[in-house]
């Protein structure tokens, strides 16, 4: 049975590595064709713009990838992941353009995808802890990442249709 994450519903019964690969490809194809004006559009009033969604996704790939690498490298698997405030992180990236955010997302997402895809089951079972979620595994993080990408891909697809 797959691990349950806050984004399990978004992932559904999809295999997470394939879902990450597909989501990154779809995001790159969709947002890569957008103008700066398109990247400043939102999917709903008061919600993040496409640029902000891409920035958030890049930041999350940075955080999730670091967590996985730290968990895999921690002696005795005693790594404790630090939570982050997504709004505070977003406030620090106001100067990042939409195209730059997309490039960062694709680069970090591809790097993480290659790592996740190379892991044997024993490494996917590597444990770490998180102050909000408790004891976790790298496999949980992979599932979380896949569902999170899908969640925000839906928002980007909504922007594309508007």
Image (cartoon, rainbow, N blue to C red):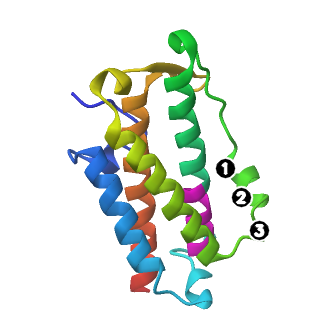
Residue 65 higher or lower than 107, as above or below: above
- For marks 1 and 3, the one nearer the N-term is 1
Q: Position of residue 115 (x, y in %)?
A: 41, 42
Q: Residue at x 62, y 63 (%)?
A: 55
Q: In the displayed image of the protein, which residue is found farthest to the top?
A: 76
- The N terminus lies in quadrant: top left
Which disc, if any, is residue 72? none
* Prevailing secondary structure of the magenta residues: helix
Q: Residue at x 46, y 86 (%)?
A: 33
Q: Is residue 78 left or right of residue 118?
A: right
Q: Is residue 72 part of the magenta span, yes or no?
A: no
Q: Element at badge 2?
A: helix
Per the model, the C-alpha gap separating discs 1 and 3 is: 13 Å
Q: Residue at x 53, y 55 (%)?
A: 108
Q: Which residue is mark 1?
A: 86
Q: Which residues are magenta?
A: 50-58
Q: Residues within 10 Å of mark 2 (few under 14, many from 20)?
A: some
Q: Position of residue 80 (x, y in %)?
A: 61, 21
Q: Nearer the viewer, residue 131 or 104?
A: 104
2 and 3 marks in contact (CB < 8 Å): yes
Q: Which residue is mark 3?
A: 94
């Amino acid at each position: 049975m797959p691990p349950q994450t806050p984004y399990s519903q978004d992932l559904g019964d999809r295999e997470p590595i394939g879902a990450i690969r597909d989501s990154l490809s779809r995001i790159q194809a969709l947002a890569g064709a957008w103008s700066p004006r398109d990247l400043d559009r939102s999917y709903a009033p008061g919600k993040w713009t496409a640029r902000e969604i891409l920035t958030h996704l890049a930041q999350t790939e940075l955080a999730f990838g670091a967590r996985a690498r730290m968990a895999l490298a921690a002696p005795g698997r005693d790594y404790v992941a630090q939570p982050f405030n997504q709004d505070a992180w977003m406030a620090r990236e106001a100067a990042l353009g939409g195209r730059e955010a997309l490039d960062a997302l694709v680069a970090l997402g591809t790097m993480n995808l290659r790592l996740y895809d190379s892991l044997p089951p024993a490494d996917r079972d590597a444990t770490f802890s998180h102050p909000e979620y408790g004891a976790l595994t790298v496999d949980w993080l992979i599932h979380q990442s896949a569902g999170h990408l899908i969640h925000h891909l839906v928002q980007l697809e909504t922007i594309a249709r508007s």
